[in-house]
Each structure stands twice: as structure tokens, then as C-alpha cells.
Amino acid sequence: MRVMAINGSPRKEWNTGILLNKALEGAKSKGAETEIIHLYDYNFKGCTSCFACKIRGGKSYGTCGFRDEMTPVYEKIKNVDVLILGSPIYFGDVTGELRSFIERLLFPYLVYTFPPKTLFPKKIGIGLIYTMNCPENFASQVGYDRLFSGNEQVMNMILGKAESLMSYETYQFADYSKVVADGIDEAPRKKRREEIFPIDCENAFKLGVKLVEEQQRIAQAIY
């Protein structure tokens, strides 16, 4: 089993990165080979609407025709069994880096039929991990649930069954005294970091285990 994590956060070892690595630990505990890609290390663009992936009979049909540093990563994904994507929420959505990555990951495989079809060669397990500064009730009030469910739906359609994990009211700054954030009370955030975030880490570990186990069951059923 091959498992790849995609870190859409500019920080490698903070909330999103920690949860992604916990998910990979869970996957590794079931014997999987794991790798993490930090998007901010790469020079790449989102979809350029060249439509090379849609040209009938074209050499790039079903594959992103735009070549940059992300191209080898997209090639690797064709051979993974589980893909786990993680991002902090910035102004109600994933980071621009992850959004750009997802555009070019999914669009080449989408076939404009009714119902839509996919050219991706197999069904893989998908994990979606979100970290955010806001409380869970606020996230629901402003419609984050639609973002989460919408991402699951498109992943289900094109790549495979998706499952989401959310971490709320994260500890945002390493040192709150150095930043202007008077509207945020550090004390409850620190308490949550100590008491709730470890549970989020456990759930991320379990997510990695679950995704690998599901793919192992599928492989056993086929062979």
C-alpha cells in the first residue's frame, strides 16, 4: 500500500502538518509506504484552462498538459492507494496552494458526460483534513459544511471514497504575545491545545489506519 499526504499549509510542523503526519503514522502502522508533499516547497500553478487534457485524440488527453514542478507529483498519485490532503481554512476555503493543486489533479480525469465519468485508473481512499481558528458552531453557521461536503462529493466522483476530519479552535501562534490578536483569548486556546488537539491527533491516526484497511480489503476482494 502506498499512501501520500499533501500539506496545503505553508507551515510544515504546525496544526495541519502534525495531523497529516499522524495520519501517515496510522497508515504506516498497517504496513503502508508513506510520503508527504509540502506544496509550498514547489513552484507551480493552478489550472491554466489550456484544455490539453480534453483534446479528442490529443497526446495529453486525460493528463495535465501543463509542465512544472508539480508534474512528477501528479504522476506519482496515479500509483498511490490512499491520498490524504490537508489544509488550514483561510477566509472560508482551503489555501490557494491546495486549491491550485486540486484543480490540476482532478480536472484532467473529469469527462464531460451525463452523469460525469472519471478517467482515473482506479478507486483510491481519500482523506481530507481541515484545521481552522473558528469554533465548530461558527463554522456551521457560515457554511463551512458545504465546503467540506462539496469536496467529498467531487473526490468521490473522480478519485474514490472520501472522509473528512476537522480540527477547530486551533492554537494559531507559537507566541501570542508577539502578535496583534486582542480578540482571541489565548488561555482557552492553550487549554484546548493540551486537551482536545491530542484527540484530533488520535482521530487522524485512526483515519490513516481506516483508509489503508479499506483499500486492503478492496485489494483482497479483487485478488
Image (cartoon, rainbow, N blue to C red):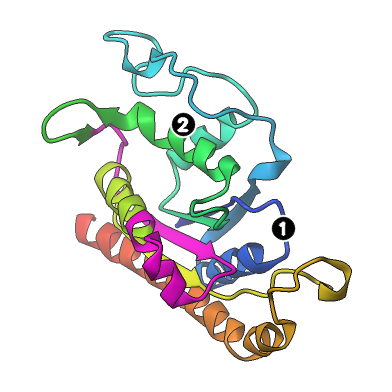
Q: Is residue 178 left or right of residue 42?
A: right
Residue 71 visible in this rendered orientation of the protein: yes
Q: Position of residue 13 (x, y in %)?
A: 73, 64
Name the kind of residue labelled 2 in the image. Answer: Arg
Residue 208 visible in this rendered orientation of the protein: no
Identify the residue at horizontal 26%, vertical 9% (top origin): 56
Task: Compare marks 1 and 2 and give the one earlier in the sequence.
Answer: 1
Identify the residue at horizontal 69%, vertical 43% (top origin): 40
The answer to which quarter of the image holds residue 98 is: top right
Q: On residue 174, which mark appears?
A: none
Q: Which residue is mark 1?
A: 12
Q: Is residue 181 left or right of residue 96?
A: right
Name the element at disc 1: loop
Q: Which residue is mark 2?
A: 104
The image shows residue 59, relative to residue 175, as above or below, that is: above
The image shows residue 160, relative to residue 183, as above or below, that is: above
Q: Position of residue 110 (x, y in %)?
A: 29, 31
> What is the magenta range?
118-147
Distance (Cα) linking label 1 and label 2: 22 Å
The answer to which quarter of the image holds residue 33 is: bottom right
The answer to which quarter of the image holds residue 120 is: top left
